[in-house]
Amino acid sequence: MQKCAVTRKPYPPGQKSKKRTPSPSEYAKELAEKQKLRNWYGLREKQFSGYVKAVLGKRGRAQDASVVLIASLERRLDNTVFRLGFASQRAQARQLVSHRHFTVNGRAVNIPSFQVKKGDIIQVAEKAKQKLFFKNSAAGLKKYQPPSWLKLDAKDMKGEVVDSPSLREAAPPAEISAIFEYYSR
């Protein structure tokens, strides 16, 4: 057999160990799932644990806990702005909200964690509509299709929350039950 730098053997070099990597522990798997979801929404640990612990606190009274957790994360104003298509990334949406470029029911809001409710109208502020960013994104909004729980009016640059977000439509990249296991320790 000829030596090739590209082919990788299933074991590391040397005489001792012939095993590449040990399988991760249960704790490591739960931590990885938590980090996936936390980073997906762009939250700090304290914020994310607050959402999870609030859901765990009312676990007996609520329906499926994973649905409640995802719904509360999806209803954040920065995520709603992202889902409406006003921003291409959640971090960008967070910054736009922080700079008071959006109004909720006619009032300027600069808190990214603001929870929107059914019937709330999220609109680009009149001053912000003059900005080059929103003028350029107006053309892309006409083709954008938001999730079913949001209604978008691309011409007026506003959206409305018409329903509650669903777990299936949000499609989180993590296993939610592992996250609850992690915080139940």
Image (tube, helix red, strand yellow):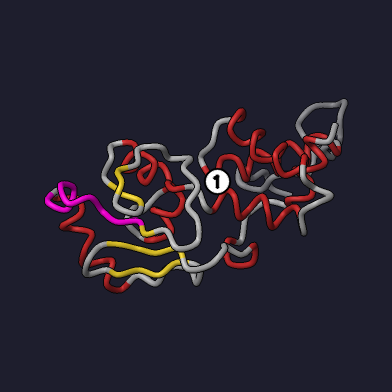
Q: Judge whether residue 46 can be spotted in this image.
A: yes
Q: Residue 58 at what x, y percent from top left?
A: 77, 45
At x 51%, y 40%, the residue is 42
Q: Would you say 33 lies left or right of 5 here?
A: right
Q: Residue 65 at what x, y percent from top left?
A: 75, 52
At x 69%, y 47%, the residue is 2
Q: Judge whether residue 22 can be spotted in this image.
A: no
Segment colored magenta: 122-130
Three-letter residue code for mark 1: Trp
Q: Is residue 122 above or below residue 112?
A: below
Q: Would you say 57 lies left or right of 15 here?
A: left
Q: Residue 68 at what x, y percent from top left?
A: 68, 54
The number of discs equals 1
Closer to us: 5 or 153: 153
Q: Does the magenta stretch include residue 125?
A: yes
The residue tagged 1 is 40
Q: Is residue 169 above or below residue 52?
A: below
At x 14%, y 48%, the residue is 131
Residue 140: which quarter of the image?
A: bottom left
Closer to us: 11 or 45: 45
Q: Which image quadrant: the C terminus?
A: top right
Say which element carries label 1. helix
Q: Residue 125 at what x, y percent from top left?
A: 22, 50
Q: Would you say 139 lies left or right of 23 here?
A: left
Alpha-carbon neighbours of circle 1 within 10 Å: few (<14), some, or many (≥20)? few
Q: Would you say 10 lies left or right of 75 here?
A: right
